[in-house]
Image (cartoon, rainbow, N blue to C red):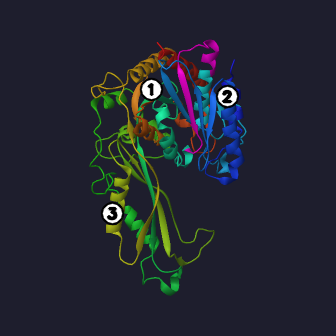
Amino acid sequence: MFDPVEKLKEFIRCPSVSTDPKFKEGMVGAQNFVSGLLGSLGFKVEVVKTDVHPIVLASRGGDPAWPHVVIYGHYDVQPADPLGLWKTKPFEPTVIGNRIYGRGAADNKGPLMTNIAAVAQLLEENPGLPLRITFLIEGEEEIGSPSFPAFLAAYADRLRQADFVYLSDTALPNESQVVITCGLRGLGLFDLIVTGPKGDLHSGLHGGVLRNPIQALAEICATLHTPDARVNVPGFYDDVLEVEPWERAELAKLAGDGKAYMDFLGIDAFYTPPGFSPFEAIRFQPTLEFNGVGGGYQGDGTKTVIPSRAFAKISCRLVPNQEPDKIKGLVMEAIRARTPKGVKVEFVDQHKGDAYVVVPPGRPNTPKDQSPVLARAFRATEAAVTAVWGRPPLYLREGGSVPIIPQIKNATGLDSVMLGLFLPEDNLHAPNESFNLDVMEKGVETAKRILSGITS
């Protein structure tokens, strides 16, 4: 019998940090591990070279009349820094209680291994399963999937032969409630650079005669939100897709505990737009965030300098109908208009991703031309979750972004069924990342039932 926990341990031991060239060997190791594992299960494996890290495409063919599912995942992980905050070694998997600790345990190696295990066990039990399966596993998700558009341009016709995409790279609100994610926020990122004098200056000799770029940066950034937490950029909300009543009703079933959420975040007050609870805001509203700021002396002690430049890293999480380039243009235009005299601004464009929404069958806004196999997959997912977890899933949008999902939709027309498997306490992108092994066990059984269910 395929042991998903032992396989996950092997996977985590590959230090596959895609953003850092020092981890090239770990990236190669993770890709080889995935390729070898799928090959051992009888899949025809193709390693698609890219400009950065290869994509693994593994296929199980069959009768063209059989349903065809693409299972997505990624083998790259975030850096483990700061290492001093880890209680275990990040690339040496450690099981404590019902959790396995290690970088990538929850994002995305654990959920991906859950789905691989489901396929392995299902094919062992039923070698003749009437289902075509394609695994699509990339190594650049954590750096914005820069090679994915070119891959889609070359492989769209092949992927278009499938019926839908299945993945587990989204969240569960708690250990007992499964969420089928039916919407993802998009993403638009850029750097703002504010430049003043031609070089750093002595603050005693020159302070008081020019505008400090750090001060100018702070003034600009402070204008980008109103006191009531709305983004203060003309046109920012013009294209926002209205929330359907059934979506609000579905979220209300979750009955989130505001105080518990506040305690989890370590804050004493929420800062949400008018008319939206904190749980609605993170799923239904766009944002503008400052992800990093810098300028001037950063070392110990003091250095009385007026820096020549300062910067801020800005990201916008976007909801369906908002177009990333348009939003970035609006924000940049607002910044230019608010830049004080004495400094100049420039922008460095970073990666982006569209928002995505898919409507389950039976809702008022379900597309009339929805694929019958996709509808069957949603029904199979609801039945599987209800049977394994003891309660039906909720259909909710999520605040995070998976840019390749709308890219696949735009290139191939394929929609996605997204079954959440990681928890808030799994510490994605942070020290002491872990994955709940009870969730993994239930996830394997759930995925087996889903994949079986779409064949009937």
The residue under label 3 is: 333
Residue 351: tell me if it is visible.
yes
The residue under label 2 is: 39
Indicate the amino acid at tag 2.
Gly
Q: Position of residue 176 (x, y in %)?
A: 50, 24
51 or 23, nearer to the observer: 51
Residue 87: tell me if it is visible.
no
Q: Position of residue 401 (x, y in %)?
A: 46, 42
- Residue 366 belongs to magenta span: no
Q: Residues within 10 Å of mark 3 (few under 14, many from 20)?
A: few
| Label 2 to label 3: alpha-carbon separation | 51 Å
Indicate the amino acid at tag 1.
Asp
Task: Say left or right for 40 vs 249.
Answer: right
Stretch in magenta: 120-140
267 or 425, nearer to the observer: 425
- Residue 137 belongs to magenta span: yes
- The tag on residue 163 is 1
Residue, x 39% and y 62% (percent of image)? 221
Task: Say left or right for 160 vs 429.
Answer: left
Q: Position of residue 44 (x, y in %)?
A: 63, 28
Callout 1 secondary element: loop
Q: Residues within 10 Å of mark 1 (few under 14, many from 20)?
A: many
